[in-house]
Amino acid sequence: VELDCWDSKDKDDDEPIIYHGHTATSKIKFRDVCIAIRDYGFVTSEYPIILSLEVHCSDPYQIKMAEILIEIFGDSLALPSEYNLDVLPSPNDLRYKIILKSDFNVKELEDIVLLKICQTIKEQDCYHVLNISETNEKKLSRNEL
């Protein structure tokens, strides 16, 4: 499922929207699309859903995307750190999972998600334990994420 993600043009809305950029298509909230996928995506098949994210969002909206993905999909997200990627998991291993494919680094998204979890639980050193990239660790220390 391809999702073109953009910053909202509504100043009062801090959540990303989905639309086919620079066309006259309708704009739908990223959250609403994720909820629909969660609720109806596995009705006819238990095999994984690949979300192909075309991210045209600024950093704050990318962070919001990560928060929404965690909130809506939770344990259904197939994060790279969960698997030994020397041997790819089979479709059977990924039943009822959401796989993220993106034009930006999925490790970066995973780091943002993990950093948000660290900030929530206020663990000083949890980003070391969770193997977060050095770049994002520095951003966290400067409160950029």
Image: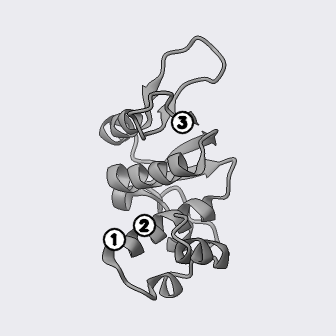
Residue 22 location, x and y as percent? 66, 19
> At label 2, which amino acid type do we have?
Lys
Q: Residue 120 carries which label?
A: 1
Helix, strand or loop for disc 1:
helix
Left or right: 63, with 20 as reference point? left
Residue 130 vertical position relative to residue 49 in the rendered view, above or below: below
Residue 101 visible, this orientation: yes
Crowd around label 3: few <14 · some 14–19 · many ≥20 (10 Å): many
Q: Residue 116 carries which label?
A: 2
Helix, strand or loop for disc 2:
helix
> Residue beneath label 3, please?
7
Residue 143 vertical position relative to residue 2 in the rendered view, above or below: below
Q: Are marks 2 and 1 in contact (CB under 8 Å)?
A: yes
Residue 80 vertical position relative to residue 141 in the rendered view, above or below: above
Residue 119 location, x and y as percent? 39, 72
- Res. 74 image quadrant: bottom left
Farthest residue, direction top: 24
Residue at mark 2 to residue at mark 1: CA–CA distance = 6 Å
Q: Which of marks 3 and 1 is nearer the N terminus?
A: 3
Q: Residue at x 33, y 71 (%)?
A: 120
Residue at mark 2 to residue at mark 3: CA–CA distance = 20 Å
Crowd around label 2: few <14 · some 14–19 · many ≥20 (10 Å): some
- Res. 20 image quadrant: top right
